Image: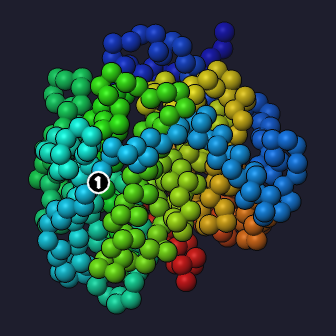
Amino acid sequence: MNVSIQTLTAACFFLLTMILIYPDSESVAAEVPPANYDESKIPCVVLPEPLLTKDGRKVDSAKLWNDVRRPELLDLFTKEMFGVRQLPASAVLTMRVDKLAESDPNALGGKATRHQLRLRFFNVSAKNDQPNDNDPKVDVLIYTPNNVKKKVPAFLGLNFRGNHTVSTDPGIVLGTVWAKPEGSKNFVPTPAKEEDRGVQSSRWPLEMILDKGFAVVTAYYGDIEPDFDGGIKFGVRKLVYSDDESPKPDEAGAIATWAWGLSLIREVVVEKNSDSLNIDPTRIAVHGHSRLGKTALWAGATDPKFALTISNDSGCGGAALSRREFGETVFRINTSFPHWFCGNFKKYNQDVNSLPFDQHELIALIAPRPVYVASAEEDRWADPKGEFLSAFHADPVYRLLGTDGINGVTRMPEVEQSVGGTIGYHLRTGKHDVTEFDWECFLNFAAKHFR
């Protein structure tokens, strides 16, 4: 039997990954085949037609798309992948906005004004009308440029490791993050460390963004819901679900919950305080990297008040076509991260072609608002070609709605070349990350569409 070194390497890599994620399980790695990185092994992919209704009608007008086909697709993605949101529909959930720290008009050497706010959540059916220290909170960090007097557009996105990690700014309040103590298998709430200030600042080039006249709004995604199986018991949803209760198969996973958090921040923090923050609520771009790129796409699809959406290296469950089964697959993502999507999505682990949609239709749900998809050449796990093809196959919907779509691009562009129109795309050199080049493209794209 001839087995290539590449195949063995992929198999060993995935086995190691599964052991790290599931240290007590030997069966998981055996059940899931090694990742495929060979284009020749991808079967013929037949994509669902976004412009064809369930009853077989060709969608040839904006009215038919908006009245029939878009609601059909949105319903399918909701019930079969992301899940029906349980927040804030429950009448028992109440929120209060607290001032976390005084605004500083001379942040970042006088370049910006910094604001910090805290959202407090509590269950009014279980207690009085005031939150306690154990109730969920979300700390929101905002920077607005001082060199612009009129209302400015903003980039809104969640961060992975706490607000203090996006900048070395000593004024950012040290909050609480989820971490595993040495020797422990469990995540616990842990006070943020001073030495971690700015450890992810390369992903958040604040001065570059501010110099271009944009504000930055961010929050720690673990505040909304911690990112591990069972995190539902510790985030905002713990006020809706009891300790012994799990979501139904069509109810939201963590990604839909994080997306809900993005919409909440846009509405409660930015829109309702746009005058005091000097932010234009009609020009908010939602963005995210990796799993938060998946989150940004779902936020953009479900919240039409996001004027622009950016997905960076979002891969499977994000911009990459599921049917290609290149790199990470639906089976792999549901096995490694069972809490991200709703239970119904697991039905497609072994038969991805039975999915009633694919990710080009997720991008199409954002139409006609601008969307940008970014990939990295060495990030094969996220399937850069599959991400481009999703953007490409969303083009007919964008054109139907009167935009230039991907602007005539018919093939994947060369590395470090930003292409497209209302749908933008680039493939850069390097690995799974957010770089200065990515941000240059995002800023140029937003500037073009926010004129």
Q: Is residue 71 visible?
A: yes
Q: In the picture, which quadrant includes the N terminus?
A: top right
Looking at the rendered structure, the kind of residue marked 1 is: Met
Q: What's the residue at 65%, 54% (across, down)? A: 365
Q: Position of residue 401 (x, y in %)?
A: 75, 67
Percent x, y of residue 72: 71, 46
Quarter of the view holding residue 278: bottom left
- Is residue 383 visible from the viewing direction of this image? no
Query: Image quadrant of residue 46?
Result: top right
Question: Whole-percent x and y of residue 337?
Answer: 44, 30
Task: Tell me where residue 57 appears, x and y as whole percent.
Answer: 88, 48
Pick the front one: 5 or 307: 307
**SS of the residue under disc 1:** strand
Identify the residue shown where x is 39% and y is 57%: 264
Residue 135 picture quarter: top left
> Residue under circle 1?
95
- Left or right relative to 433: residue 176: left
Q: Relative to residue 83, is residue 66 drawn left or right?
A: right
Q: Residues within 10 Å of mark 1 (few under 14, many from 20)?
A: some
Work out whether residue 14 or residue 297 is closer to the camera in this orientation and state it. 297
